[in-house]
Image (tube, rainbow, N blue to C red):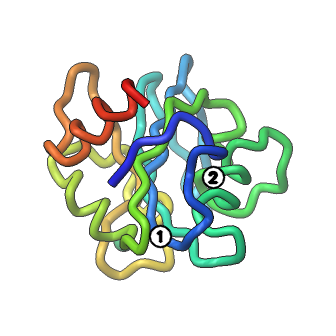
Amino acid sequence: MIFVASAADAPSTPGAYALALRLDAPLDVRIGKISATLPAGDYLYCGSARGPGGLRARLSRHLRPQKRAHWHVDQITAVASLLGAFVEEQGDECALNAALADLPIPIAGFGSSDCRRCAAHLRFLPNGAALPSRWENARKAARFT
Ligand SMILES: [Zn+2]
């Protein structure tokens, strides 16, 4: 696992990622008929990139502010600041998400409508909450590259 500060640093191979996003203000989001308010704070969203251009192309899309809303997370990336992304080449989004099981789920079903394993692919990251050590190590290593 590596931590990248921008899409350009991500490999163009397939894999899984967790976007680290920050909302400076509460955000109203909709999934299907349900609307909910995400409090300000930090979030991790797990996804996977299997298409052409791999992780780099997918992260670039997430970072583009102007795009047609396609995934639930597009509502967040349209306004959030991106802190970076945890990236695992050949990784699995549900495995990444499972590693974050201790973190609260802000909205059931968010980002996981096509997933049978996870209650949501979005987690709230409370201020000062610790990530799994593999994740913390990736984040520390990124500071020195
Ligand atoms: Zn899943």
Residues under numbered marks 2 and 1 in contact, where contact means CB atoms less than 8 Å apart? no
The type of residue carrying mark 2 is Leu
Determine whether the beta carbon of the residue marked 2 sits less than 8 angstroms from the nearest atom of ligand 1: no
Quadrant where the image shows the C terminus = top left
Instruction: Give the number of the disc on residue 15.
Output: 1
**Left or right, residue 112 beside residue 82:** left
Q: Is residue 16 above or below residue 45?
A: below
Q: Position of residue 25 (x, y in %)?
A: 56, 18
- The residue located at (63%, 52%) in the rendering is 59
Q: Residue at x 38, y 25 (%)?
A: 143
User: What amino acid is labelled 1 in the image?
Assistant: Gly
Quadrant in which the N terminus appears: bottom left
Q: Toward the viewer: 61 or 14?
A: 14
What kind of element bears circle 1? strand
Could you say where residue 105 lies in the image, as x and y percent from the top left? 31, 48
- The residue depicted at 35 percent of the width and 46 percent of the height is 123
Q: Quadrant of ligand 1?
A: bottom left
Identity of the residue furthest to the front in this view: 145
Of labels 2 and 1, earlier in sequence is 1
- Image coordinates of residue 39 in percent, x first then y, are 44, 27
State which quadrant residue 132 falls in.
Answer: top left
Q: Position of residue 72 (x, y in %)?
A: 60, 57
Residue wearing tag 2 = 59
